[in-house]
Image (cartoon, helix red, strand yellow):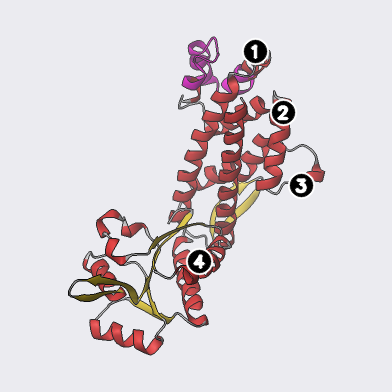
Amino acid sequence: MDLAFRIIWFEDVDEWYNTTSRRVSRYIKDKNFKVEIKRVEKASDFVIEKYQIQNYDLLIVDYELEKIYEPDGVKSIYGSEIIRMIRSGNFVNDVLFYSSHGFDVISDVMKQEGLQGVFVADRDNGEFLEMVKLLIDKAVRRADNLINIRGVVMDTTSEFDNKIRDLISIIWRTLGDKESEIVNDIKKKILKDNIKTAEKLNEKYFDINADNIDALLNERDFSAHRQARLLGWCIESNETLKLKLQEILEKYLQTDKEAGQIKFFELYNDEIIKYRNALAHVKNAPSIDSRVIIGEIDGKQVQFDKKLCDQLRKKLLNYEKALDAMYDYIESNC
């Protein structure tokens, strides 16, 4: 599982689906996940090969899916057929099988047809939503492990790196008189941080300009930490961008408006990069008291637990929205 909770939902009744799926979506979002629901309205159109079933966290299947009117009569497609198709493909996703006919009917169908590993619920009472929530909680518990959350952080922040590089490239062409000042900061405050690599990069990028800034950003030694720092300088160089950034940070990162100006780099470094670096080097081994410590951040030991997983997912989702908002604004106005 990554930052998205994915569901395939077989349901042909619009009103019930729209109301219920909104409630399910809210529950998932409260767990700090994005929601991706693929609704299948017509079971006859479902082609299993078009879906990567293994990537879905939950399948929700109605019993009575569709009636097809043919010259020789009416053919009904039932959810049990869909479940058999999925299980025959050796997919072991959690499946919730439900019906408006009640628990007993759907349970009997499941037994008669020999469906394995399927949860059942009555659609027309609170049982359905309660069962959905239990299955969501079950999937989230599986995701709250060190290996998974480390992968989520690494994958998501790699995407952030790409967005940050793109933002710098776009803004760079608007720097004007500020370019020489930022070039000087790159050389003095970034490239000379690491003396062994600084000389090589300094010689290679003796002149830094719009023609080679992308190449510099893609240098392995020009780390995510340095890229974020440079983006902060680029934004600071433009008063309009700086004000817009404050709006974005207040909206998506819930920064304190009364605290005054918040600088992107300091915030991003404290909330994302430090945790990324800690997770990149941690070993999946408990301490003597069975706690898993991922390292020290600002002099404090950071314990890996459910609370940290929730916090990291929330921060990643918020920064994803903030970076997307920055990109949309800058691309349209620079």
Residue 118 vertical position relative to residue 148 in the rendered view, above or below: below
Q: Amino acid at mark 1?
A: Ser
Quarter of the picture containing the C terminus is: top right
Q: Are marks 2 and 3 in contact (CB under 8 Å)?
A: no
Instruction: Give the numbered dot on residue 18.
Output: 4
Q: CA distance from mark 1 to mark 2?
A: 20 Å
Q: Which residue occupies 70% across, 35% down?
A: 244
Q: Nearer the viewer, mark 1 or mark 2?
A: 2
What type is the residue that disc 2 sits on? Thr
| Mark 1 touches mark 4? (CB < 8 Å) | no
Q: Secondary structure at mark 2?
A: helix
Main secondary structure found in the magenta portion: helix
Q: How many marks?
A: 4
Give the mark toward the camera: 2 or 3. 2
* Residue type indicated by callout 3: Asp
Residue of label 1: 180
Q: Which residues are magenta?
A: 186-215
